[in-house]
Amino acid sequence: MLNANTFPWSRNIDERTKVLSPEIKNLINAENYINRRYLETLDEVPRLKGESPVEARRREIFYLNITWFMSTLLDRKDRMSMASGLEVRVPFCDHRLVQYAWNIPWEIKNLDGREKGLLRRALIGILPEDVLYRKKSPYPKTHNPSYEKAVKNWFLEIMNDKSSPILPFIDIKTMMAMLKSDSDYGKPWFGQLMATPQMFAYLIQVDLWLRKFKVSIV
């Protein structure tokens, strides 16, 4: 990830864009757009004089995550929680804490050779050890075969409906081949846990959005 010359979550662009129709792929030119925004963001990174090349690169990765990935997650959190009338707090995203942690050297952040090492050390005697030292647990996302089957069947219905608004955006041949295949794409989409079922779910959501807001293609 440190050596990837792009956003850490936007690798394997060819695999991701193969779901798009050739017309859309040529129109948006995703690889050029991503590369341009990546380089623009690197130009914004605040530098710390005297840092080693590795530390400078880590600073770039942190900045990419703060300005792109984290802001996306926070936006989703706000939208989903407020839509449900739920008040959600993210205390570790307090801007003062982020600003303070910005210049903490990696060997301290990674104290004891563990991610969030400094935070874990600070909470010794406050949190139970089984909480303090457990592995990171992301948001749960089902791998239940029934869910995968349901998503696949739903997307197949969309593909077989000639009036589906998403059809002009996707490569029909590629998507039908993926629907007929029992193998998984194998790489998570946008840093999450699932691969092909998640991608089908994304496309279902786009189709629903296009229908709900009566978006027409001109």
Image (tube, rainbow, N blue to C red):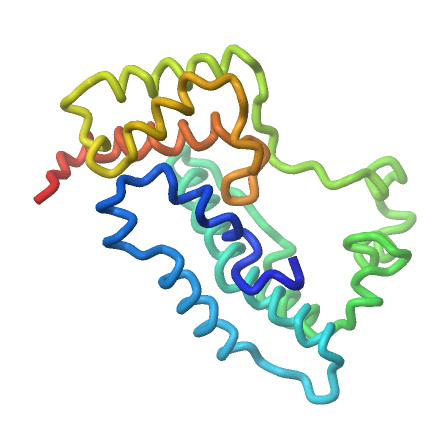
Left or right of 38 on screen, residue 24: left
At 73% across and 73% down in the image, what residue appears?
Answer: 54
Where residue 183 sits in the image (x, y, percent)?
54, 22
Furthest toward the left, the residue is: 218
In terms of image quadrants, where is residue 207?
Answer: top left
Furthest toward the top, the residue is: 146
At 25% across and 47% down in the image, what residue appears?
Answer: 24
Height in image: 76 above or below 42? above
At 39% across and 23% down in the image, what residue appears?
Answer: 177
Front-most of 60 and 17? 17
In terms of image quadrants, where is residue 135?
Answer: top right
**Picture mark count:** 0
Where residue 100 sits in the image (x, y, percent)?
68, 72
User: In what quadrant of the picture does the N terminus appear?
Assistant: bottom right
Height in image: 160 above or below 20? above
At 73% across and 41% down in the image, what residue appears?
Answer: 136
User: In what quadrant of the picture does the C terminus appear?
Assistant: top left
Where residue 86 sits in the image (x, y, percent)?
47, 37
Height in image: 147 above or below 21? above
Where residue 93 sits in the image (x, y, percent)?
60, 57
Left or right of 91 on screen, residue 175: left
Furthest toward the bottom, the residue is: 49
Left or right of 189 on screen, residue 218: left
In terms of image quadrants, where is residue 85?
Answer: top left
